[in-house]
Amino acid sequence: MHIPDAFIPMGQALVYWIIALIFIALALRWARSSMKEEKVPLVAVLAAGIFAIQAVNIPIPWGTSGHMVGAALAAIVLGSPYAGVFVLTLVLLVQGIIFGDGGITVMGANIINMGVVGGFVGYYGYTALNGVMNNAYVAAFIAGWASLFISAILCAVELAIAGTFPLDLGLTFMGAYHAVIGLIEGGITAVALYLIASARPDILERPAGVTA
């Protein structure tokens, strides 16, 4: 799902960067006000884990690549969609600048797709579903799947607007691949939430329905 440089024209990439910077600023404000000292190790572990799961990439015809994202997990565990933006921005900066995974000029689009959309869909999807079914782990599974799938669809739309890939083929392949990969994403989100709630409930935001 990492968009490389030159896949999006500079004018469009600049617009995505401006939008991303707004959310990055809000995420930094969240970090200053809500990220207590005892949560710093958890943020580091989440970032490292997300970096690792994103390393498994599957090339997608008429798309970019297929992989897990992890923004929903960060947002749910840390109790804010801005946590997803914050953690994914850190991960994407390291991947893009040091490892060349995802372009620099288009990083704004990557942050929007994976951090903003992944974090907001994951967190609010989880909150809404958990309120209806009162089962935090099923809600986390569905929210994790949805966060990945919708991020992939948005990526396909952006590439179609850029004229890189046809919309129908992009949606078909990015959607189909990530619909399957999303099952793994959802499973990891639910299992990780359960393990954290079981081992260290004191550092969890304790979403309703989470039991150790």
Image (cartoon, grey):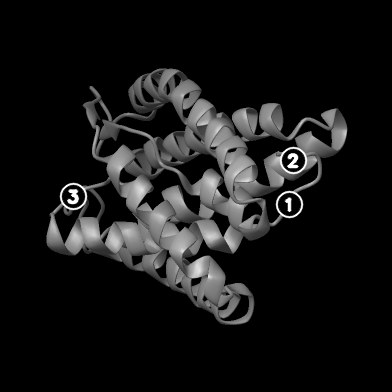
Please tell me the numbered disc located at residue 210: 2
- The answer to whether 140 is drawn above or below residue 7 in the figure is above
Quadrant that contains the C terminus: top right
Identify the residue under disc 3: 101
Mark 2–mark 1 distance (CA, rounded to whole Å): 6 Å
| In this rendering, the label closer to the viewer, 3 or 1 | 1
Identify the residue under disc 1: 206
Q: Are marks 2 and 1 in contact (CB under 8 Å)?
A: yes
* Sequence-wise first label, 3 or 2: 3
Query: Which residue reaches farthest front?
Result: 199
* Sequence-wise first label, 3 or 1: 3
Nearest the viewer among 144 and 171 is 144
- Residue 117 percent location from the top left of the image: 53, 49
Amino acid type at mark 3: Asp
Q: Secondary structure at mark 2?
A: loop
Answer yes or no: is residue 171 visible: yes
Q: In this image, 83 relative to 79: left or right?
A: left
Mark 3–mark 1 distance (CA, rounded to whole Å): 34 Å
Residue 10 sits in quarter: bottom left
Q: Are marks 3 and 1 in contact (CB under 8 Å)?
A: no
Amino acid type at mark 1: Arg
Answer yes or no: is residue 1 visible: no
Q: What residue is shown at x 77% (from left), y 34% (from top)?
A: 129
- Residue 135 percent location from the top left of the image: 78, 30
Q: What residue is shown at x 46% (from left), y 54% (from top)?
A: 115
Amino acid type at mark 2: Val
